[in-house]
Every structure is written in structure tokens, then in C-alpha cells.
Amino acid sequence: MITKKLLINKESYENSINEAAAILNDGGIVAIPTETVYGLAASAKSDTAIKKVFEAKGRPQDNPLIVHISNMDMLNFVAKDIPEKALDCAKRFWPGPLTMVLPRTDYTAPSVSAGLNSVAVRMPSHKTALDIIEISGLPLAAPSANVSGSPSPTSPFHVENDLNGKIDAIVYDNECAVGVESTVISFCVNPPRLLRPGAVTKEQLLEIIPDLAVDKAVLKEPEKDAKVESPGMKYKHYAPKTSVFLVEGDSDEFIKFVNSEKDCSAICFYEEFNQITVPKLSYGEGENEESLAKGVFSALREIDNLNLEKVYIHAPSKTGIGLAVYNRLLRAAAFRVIKL
Ligand code: TXA
Ligand code: MG
């Protein structure tokens, strides 16, 4: 298959979004930008289009997809019995990086929900994404546009690297502003539960949902065969070929530790870069968790170019969006944490 390049600039914008919408209406699959990461979109109503998404990504069949909407009418088509608190969250955080798991209607194809009777819904804030949804008139099911298990794509070139030749088109927009996937909360359990941390922080959600629970899998390895609320959390994720170790400690400790190790590389904070003597990349400023979120997936993609056996990554703080970065790195590290 030849993957079409749909460029986004002043002259091509209208043509590109119209073409993306047309392909989606024809049952095709298109990588689109969102504010979090690039998504691989398909009509949420078409079982055959959804099957193509699972196939292109090599995604396990039991891992459900997020449905992307552009207005509140669409929410009422795809979900029912929506609790008041969920509507409060929609008012406060949509459009934006929050996904809510709600009871589903029969509007979307069952394969979207991988057999569950819930549906995950989010209204992205990215203009290109919203315009494509609006013009196509379709709620779009879209997982991250990477090969399953590899780091999520924050630029169209990451998508190209993983999926060129396997999907109908890629929309070439800018790098993603947030850099980690949306926060996921479930309203299908009582009390509502944070399943995946993201840019809408636990602290912000607690203001609306004071009894919000945090799923164990956010910071711990799910036990084998345990029932998990979010199927995505049990799979190996975000892992480069290089063996990843997450390292907790202050800057002095981290620098001293990696400089004394052999055959390794480091992913550090900007401010540590000049003092590290092994091959290294930095992924953001240690004190600025937003910058770490923006840089984390690119760094995980680039580390294999250094061709070393191991990489030690300096862990961020677990507050604000730092919790989301920590959660992704923990999975990239297959839960191997070194505490200095
Ligand atoms: O920011 C994002 O959320 C990006 C962009 C493209 O919107 N999408 C994304 O999709 O990260 P994906 O498929 O990589 O992650 C979806 C997560 C998975 O962990 C999945 O298990 C969970 O959401 N999920 C989806 N539907 C669910 C449901 N009905 N119940 C529980 N978890 C669900
Ligand atoms: Mg993903």
C-alpha cells in the first residue's frame, strides 16, 4: 500500500483535511495529529475499518480504542447514562487531554470496545483533529499511531517510521504540544478511577471528584492474570531495544551513578547533560515536568541510535504531569527501578 502524505500548511490545509475526511468515510485509516500524540484514526462505526487499525499496529485484540468526538451531540450518540460528574469533567477539561470511560450505546462497532460494555471517549483540543472529525461527521476511533509496544508518536515522522506502507494516509502537522497520551478515568466503577495519568492531572481531577481512586496499575506492575480495568496497562509498552532502567535520586546522585557504570547510555535532564561522561540524551528540564512530557517519547525512540546495551533514565517527580511521565517510563523499563 502507498501511504498518502497529507501536508498541513496555509495553502494545503483545506485540501488535506477534506481528503483525510473522505478516506475515513470510505473506511480507510489515517494518522492524525492531536495535542497529546498522533492517533491512527478510523470510523468508529465501521467494524472493517477498526480491524485495519488493529492489524496495522499489531495491537492485541482485547485492547479497546478511544473514540474521538468534536461536539457534545456525538457524546450522546456513543455513550449513555452519563453521570453528572462526567459532564462536569467535560465542561472543565474538554476539548483537551481527558478520556472518560462510560457505558456504551450500540452506535459504535463492538470491536472499538474489544467486547467490553463501556466506551472510552475524548474531545481533543487540536484544531486539525477537530476539523477532520467535524468534516467527516464521524466519531473517530484512534489509538496512538505507533506499532504496538513501541514509544508513542509525537511527530509525523515517528508515524512514518512505524506505519509507512501499512495505512492509507498520514497528516503531517507539527509536533504534539503535550507529548504523552491523555488521562483516562473510568466512570464505570464506583468511585470513579484514574486508569492512566496524563496532562489533566490527578490533582485537578480531585477538585471535581474528591473520592477519585487511583488504579494500582498506575505505579505498579499488574499481577499475572489479574483483572485489569484498563486492558492497555497489562501490555509491554513504550520500550526501545536498549534495556531501560529507571533511576530515582537527585541530580548529584544520578550523575555520579551513571558516570561510574560501563557500556551504558543515559537519558538525563538538560541541566545534567554537560556533567555526564557516558553517551547521553536529555529529555527536558528536571524542574519542568511539561518539558519532560514533551521530550520523553522522542528520547525513547532515539536511544537505540547510541547502540548500547543499557540506558539509565533519570526519573521525574510523580506530581502533576510528572506522574504520567513516570508511569510511561516505568513501563518502558519493564518495572525495573533503581533507587539511589
Ligand atoms: O491521547 C490519547 O489518548 C491518544 C490520542 C491519539 O488520542 N490515544 C491513545 O490511545 O493513547 P491508545 O489506544 O494508545 O490508549 C488507549 C487506552 C488503552 O490503555 C486502553 O486499554 C484504554 O485506553 N481504554 C480504551 N477503551 C477502554 C475501555 N472501554 N475501558 C477501559 N480502558 C479503555
Ligand atoms: Mg498506545
Image (cartoon, grey):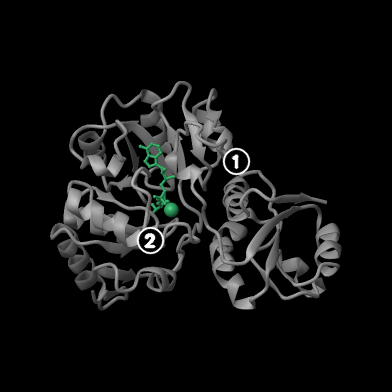
SS state under label 1: loop
Residue 185 left/right relative to 116:
right
Measured from the top left, where is residue 144 in percent x and y?
Answer: 40, 56
Q: Which of 15 and 234 lies nearest the eye of the viewer? A: 234
Residue beneath disc 2: 145
**Vertical side of 300 occupied by 290: above or below:** above
Ligand 1 closer than 8 Å to label 2 CB: yes
Q: Residue furthest left?
A: 26
Residue 105 left/right relative to 311:
left
Residue beneath disc 1: 221
The residue lying at 47 percent from left, 60 percent from top is 152
**Vertical side of 340 occupied by 165: above or below:** below
Identified by mark 2, the residue type is Ala
Counting every numbered tag in the picture gives 2
SS state under label 2: loop
Residue 230 left/right relative to 214:
left
The residue lying at 83 percent from left, 69 percent from top is 259
Measured from the top left, where is residue 180 in percent x and y?
Answer: 51, 54
Identified by mark 1, the residue type is Glu
Ligand 1 closer than 8 Å to label 1 CB: no
Measured from the top left, where is residue 212 in percent x and y?
Answer: 53, 27
